[in-house]
């Protein structure tokens, strides 16, 4: 089992910045992928950004150049720096953890943190 706790959401004006954090604890494999997904009202959950334990990153086209994902493996924590925020970035942001080495193949999710961008 992996427990994920997100923090850093809130209300910000368009053009502003926020930094999300997600701390993982429990049965964590050294080789894993952590990432951020978001779900806006009435929409499906979508990938925002992901990062492997070796530092390889992947971003949704809609956030490239504005968001940066990073991680601290010693702290089992992943971050999402969000700059130049837009109203369409408003969503609940969920942290995800998954490892190909986990025999269960399970994906673990945090409870989410709300990001609201006002125009």
Image: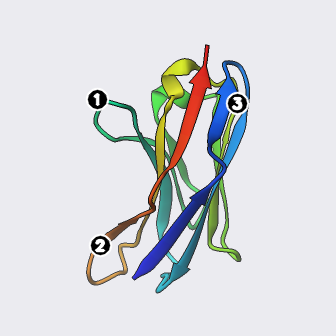
User: Which residue sits at x=60%, y=25%?
Assistant: 117
Q: Which residue is mark 3?
A: 83
Residue density around tag 3, few if under 14, some if 14–19, many if 20 or more, within 10 Å: some
**Residue 37 percent across, percent down from the top left:** 43, 46
User: Which residue sits at x=56%, y=67%?
Assistant: 53
Q: Which residue is mark 1?
A: 42
Q: Earlier in the sequence, mark 3 or mark 2?
A: 3
Q: Give the tally of numbered discs.
A: 3
In the current view of this chain or complex, which residue is farthest to the top? 119
In the structure shown, which secondary structural element does the residue marked by tag 3 occupy?
loop
Tell me if residue 57 comes above or below residue 87 in the rendering: below
Q: Foreground mark, 2 or 1?
A: 1
Residue 119: image quadrant is: top right
Q: Which residue is mark 2?
A: 106
Which one is in front, 75 or 93? 93
**Residue 61 percent across, percent down from the top left:** 47, 28
- The answer to whether marks 1 and 3 mark residues whose Cβ atoms lie closer than 8 Å is no
In the structure shown, which secondary structural element does the residue marked by tag 1 occupy?
loop
């Amino acid at each position: 089992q992996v427990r994920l706790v997100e923090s850093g959401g809130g209300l910000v004006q368009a053009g502003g910045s926020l930094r999300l954090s997600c701390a993982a604890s429990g049965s964590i494999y050294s080789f894993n992928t952590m990432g951020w997904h978001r779900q806006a009202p009435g929409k499906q959950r979508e990938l925002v950004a992901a990062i492997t334990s070796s530092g390889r990153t992947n971003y949704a086209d809609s956030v490239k150049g504005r968001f940066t994902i990073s991680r601290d493996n010693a702290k089992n924590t992943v971050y999402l720096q969000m700059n130049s925020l837009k109203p369409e970035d408003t969503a609940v942001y969920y942290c995800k953890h998954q490892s190909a080495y986990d025999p269960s193949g399970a994906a673990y999710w945090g409870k989410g943190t709300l990001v609201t961008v006002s125009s």
